């Protein structure tokens, strides 16, 4: 990990968080868009209640503990109001850091 970024943006109700981030020009990384790789993992800083409930993929990949600590998979999350998320930027395929 050689970088860290935090972003705040608003999206239309029901939008997929990853798609909204891509459309907003955010540098959020992703690979599968299907809840399998965890590359799109984000930390919800504000507005957690404005996200759809965690999907089965998120529960399986992230586990209850990370979900409780407000980590989500952007590709599996739908936004129903204003939120603020933070995501780490990895360069050179370094992978995820532990949370
Ligand atoms: S892009 Fe792979 S889990 Fe979201």
Image (spheres, rainbow, N blue to C red):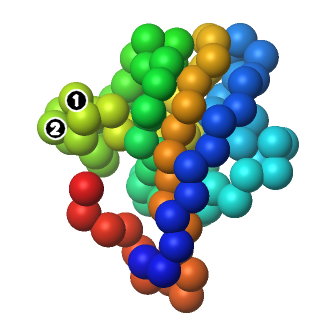
For label 1, the SS is helix
Q: Position of residue 96 (x, y in %)?
A: 37, 68
Residue 74: give x, y in percent of width and height. Answer: 54, 40
* Nearer to the camera, 61 or 79: 79
| Left or right position of 95 against 64 | right
Name the residue: 71% across, 12% down: 13
Image coordinates of residue 45 in percent, x first then y, are 44, 33
What distance separates the C-alpha of mark 2 from that of mark 1? Answer: 5 Å
Relative placement, left or right, of 97 versus 19 is left
Q: Can residue 42 be seen in this view?
A: yes
Locate the C terminus by quadrant.
Answer: bottom left
Mark 1 vs ligand 1: CB below 8 Å: no
Residue named by callout 2:
65
* Residue farthest to the bottom, as pictured: 92
| Above or below, 27 relative to 80 | below
Between 25 and 53, which is closer to the camera in this rendering?
25
Q: How many marks?
A: 2
> 12 left or right of 34?
right
Q: Who is closer to the viewer here, 3 or 93?
A: 3
Q: What element carries label 2?
A: helix
At x 25%, y 35%, the residue is 69
Q: Can residue 34 be seen in this view?
A: no
Q: Evaluate if marks 2 and 1 touch, with contact meaning CB atoms under 8 Å apart.
A: yes
What residue sits right under mark 1 in the picture? 68
* Residue at x 82% of width, y 51% of height: 25
- Quadrant into which the N terminus falls: bottom left
Q: Which mark is residue 8?
A: none
Say above or below: 31 vs 9. below
- For the point 71% across and 42% down, the residue is 21
């Amino acid at each position: 990990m050689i970088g860290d970024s935090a972003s705040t943006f608003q999206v239309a109700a029901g939008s997929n968080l990853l798609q909204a981030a891509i459309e907003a020009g955010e540098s959020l990384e992703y690979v599968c868009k299907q809840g399998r790789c965890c590359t799109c993992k984000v930390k919800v800083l504000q507005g957690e209640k404005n996200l759809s409930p965690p999907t089965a993929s998120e529960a399986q990949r992230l586990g209850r503990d990370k979900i409780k600590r407000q980590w989500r998979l952007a590709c599996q999350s739908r936004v129903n109001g204003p939120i603020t998320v933070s995501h780490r930027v990895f360069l050179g395929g370094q992978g995820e850091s532990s949370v």
